[in-house]
Amino acid sequence: MVEEQQKPVDQLQPEYLDKINQELYKRNYELAVRNKTLSLLRDLYAITIESLATDELGKEIVRTLRKGLGFELVGLFVLNEDKTILNPIALSISDHSKETVTALEQEFMKLPIKLVDMSNIANEAIVTKQQIESESLLDVWKPLDQSSVLEQLNEVCNIRTSIVYPLINDAGPIGVLVCSINRTYNELSQFEHQSIESVIDVITIALDKSLLYDQLRVANQKLRELDVAKSEFMSIASHQLRTPLAGIVGYLSMLVEGDYGDMVPEQKEVIKEIFTAGQRLVRLVNTFLNVTRIEAGRFTINFSAVDITAAVAAEVKELQPTANKKGLKLSYIAPAEKIMAQVDGDKIRDVFLNLIDNAIKYTPHGSVTVSVTQADNQAQFIVSDTGIGIDHKEAQNLFEKFVRGTGIARIQPNGSGLGLYIVKKIVEAHGGKVWVESEGVEKGSTFHAQFPLEQSNNT
């Protein structure tokens, strides 16, 4: 009995040997298909990581899928917004057919699939959400507009079966994958079917991601165009407002000074209020102009020697009446010696004016202290207040465009959110930096603007 069980292979019955060989072939074939599937999934995963644009992704997917599974033709199609047409994204044809078919590829990419009736197997796949197969590639495009192109593809590629796989995400169908082979559908093994099905989900996720990327790219481009249009509008509007405003403010200043005769106190007080409002409006127009120049790359800096100490003193003096009106103590701690720096005088004074003005605006009571120091060939302008303070989470973004602190917006709801953005751009254009320190809400703030005394690109 033991001797019978240990018979050498060449003494076994032929029928038994055939059965063993068939089972080995089946197992080896299954293993080969599984390895091919794993390799294909790995390649597709790499493609989804590297490719974002739909056309680029589509080309890589159909090429990799066709080669990986040995198909004759693989095409990828995406549904339009109305879900009435499948537009071709990419096509890959077997190497032995390429020479003959190359001339037809461009024509093929112009052939959308019109989803008009159920005789079209692509339409059937979309409606039923099931794969549909046919012996003829022409059934994918019924009714046909350019049947000659499809007939040539069908013949040259020796296509015997075309299968349409719907690509479906959570919202519904987004497209189809068309695979054509030179065998009948029944000749595909179970493992080949499983291999195709395993990659469909990967392809759907990748296509969904790339379509979203394309939508975001288009939306981003439109936003850029709108931003340019907005900047141009702001620039034109600001320029148009600037001239008449300058005239209005100029005449109001002359009225306040008495150049057109004396006025009763009540009249003079009203004119002063109008004059102050006009100055604020001029400053706002200049702010918009500066922003448009910054965004357009036309924000120029003209360096010259400026006494920083005197420039700060002038701005403190200009804003002293504003502080007095609020009952705030505005003080300037001047250095023992004047500090000279190579700066754009007008723009650096805008920095001083903006930071001091902000401190006064957002300090309900208490004091605002201004100082300027020199150290290591750097000038540092500092404004400290006892005002509303700044939340630590908001401090880092405070110098961005249109950003305003929560407490700031509550006290001054009409601010533009551009002042600190311009301050930052001016200081950075001088090779410096600007930042804010605050222990928190209701604990005051300290703004710093630091810039070099000399500019390396200026003599």
Image: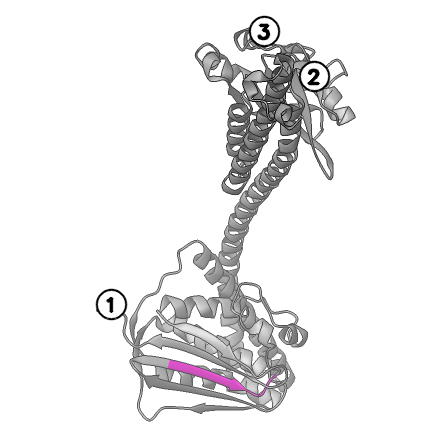
Which one is earlier in the sequence, the residue at label 2 or at label 1? 2
Q: Secondary structure at mark 2?
A: strand
- Circle 1 sits on which residue? 458
Q: CA distance from mark 2 to mark 1?
A: 75 Å
The residue closer to the viewer here, 63 or 123, is 63
Q: Secondary structure at mark 1?
A: loop
Callouts 2 and 1 close, C-beta under 8 Å = no
User: Above or below — where is 423 with respect to 116?
Assistant: below
State the image coordinates of residue 456 (x, y, percent, origin top left): 25, 68
Circle 3 packing at 10 Å, graded few (<14), some (14-19), many (20+), is some
Q: Say the numbered circle drawn on residue 133.
A: 2
User: Above or below — where is 241 with respect to 430?
Assistant: above
Q: Is residue 335 magenta?
A: no
Quadrant of the snapshot with the C terminus: bottom left
| Pair 3/2: label in front | 2
**Magenta residues, start to end:** 380-387
Callouts 3 and 2 close, C-beta under 8 Å = no
* Amino acid bearing label 3: Glu
Callouts 3 and 1 close, C-beta under 8 Å = no
> From the viewer's perspective, is 377 left or right of 89?
left
| Pair 3/1: label in front | 3
